[in-house]
Amino acid sequence: MDIDHDFDAGSIEVLSADAPDDVALALRGDSDAGFRQWFCFRALGLRGVDARLSIVDASEATYPDAFDGYRVVASYDRRRWFRVPTSYDGERLVIEHTPRTDDVMYAYFAPYPLARRERLLRRAARAPWVRHEVIGRTVLGRELSMLSFGEEGRDKLQLWVVARQHPGETMAEWLAEGLVTRLLDDDDPTVAAVLSRAVVRIVPCMNPDGASLGNHRTNAAGTDLNRAWLQPDAELSPEVLAARGRMEQTGVDAFLDVHGDERNPYCFLAGAEGNPGYGERLRALEDLFETSLCRQSPDFQAEYGYPRDEPGGGDLRTANNYVGEMFDCLSFTVEMPFKDSATMPDEVNGWSPERSMHLGQATLDALEECLDALRE
Ligand SMILES: [Zn+2]
């Protein structure tokens, strides 16, 4: 048998792989940073074998309690991902699985492949109402891509969505794909209604370096991009510098920053209530969007989430707070679970790429309901 992690987003350390019923693995840390959580590897030659693969240092992960009630995802074809029996004893994360083929991939969540991103960008750019723009370069010189949907115009509302600042949170890019795909359907009346009044700008992956490197939270320079919005740096966080610079040119009327949450088994929003400039108008806008999204997607709920920030206690280094404050606009972090969703559990798949994409489609309905109120 063999464990392979030498591919896009691959990440694990192999301590011993001599006996398939006692494979010892360890988490690999992010580039130049103390974070460790993401893993993604292939197990070869285990067809029909009762394999037992242990991540022996799971308790030293950045979010060890993330493994309580969590199950690893697996795939034979890299397209369909399902959950496998997983246990966590407070120290080791143990996968017990009998693969049906000799090539199975295991991961923290379904990876979003680089090749898929490139295909989606190409496909989107073929639509006459879509523009693909490289808004900047990453630390390693990769393109940072943005898609703009709808005709430009001075009075158009500017709806911004960025995803996957934290590269291990692949569900964020799956959500972005759902939204992009919907916006490519010009027979969809909601798409027509939104694009008649707004330009939708989507950065499907804010952290292409971290994604390919198999990092969980940081870019190639070891920066947590979602703590870099107040003072982005050309060397350490060029991705944020680029996105922020483009926003200053276009303006922003609504902003969604899409993430995954390691601990909470729910989809939820985190608002900008801790911002100095937060008041009744933004509170009403947040309520409108959240209520609408609850109605549009049964996967979404507003009961469970992060504790609300105290007034003035918002961290302006985060995208949602920074953009909300700077542009005095509706601004949310969107969170989805790594674990199964407790709102609507799925024994086989848990929270999945498909569900993430559906939630992305639903965000357009919720945004559409807010259009009248965005500049009031
Ligand atoms: Zn995140």
Image (cartoon, rainbow, N blue to C red):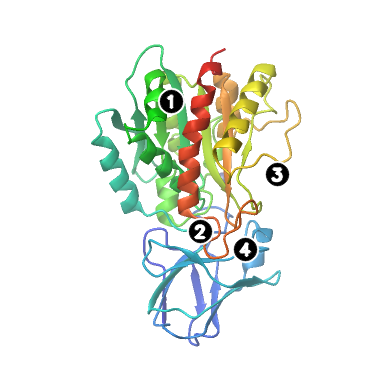
Mark 4 or mark 3, earlier in chain: 4
Mark 3 or mark 1, earlier in chain: 1
The residue at 73%/35% (across/down) is 308
Please identify, in this view, whether the residue under mark 3 or under mark 1 is nearer the observer. 3
Please identify, in this view, whether the residue under mark 1 or under mark 2 is nearer the observer. 2
- The amino acid at mark 3 is Tyr
Q: Where is residue 60 shown, x and y percent of the image?
A: 65, 64
Q: Is mark 4 within 8 Å of ligand 1?
A: no
For mark 4, give the secondary structure: loop
Q: Is residue 219 visible?
A: no
Place residue 316 in its image quadrant: top right
Mark 2 or mark 4, earlier in chain: 4
Disc number for residue 127? none
Mark 1 or mark 2, earlier in chain: 2
For mark 2, give the secondary structure: loop
**CA gap, disc 2 to disc 3?**
21 Å
**CA gap, disc 3 to disc 1?**
34 Å
Q: Where is mark 3, residue-wise?
A: 304
Q: Where is mark 1, residue-wise?
A: 245
Q: CB under 8 Å between callouts 4 and 3?
A: no
The residue at 38%/66% (across/down) is 6
- The amino acid at mark 4 is Tyr
Along the viewing direction, whichever of 232 and 25 lies nearer the viewer: 25
Q: Where is mark 2, residue-wise?
A: 109
Q: Is residue 210 visible?
A: yes
Quick check: 145 left or right of 280?
Answer: left
**CA gap, disc 4 to disc 1?**
38 Å
Q: Where is mark 4, residue-wise?
A: 70
In this picture, is 87 found above or below 132?
Answer: below
**CA gap, disc 1 to disc 2?**
31 Å
Q: CB under 8 Å between callouts 3 and 1?
A: no
Q: Where is residue 238 shown, x and y percent of the image?
A: 43, 36
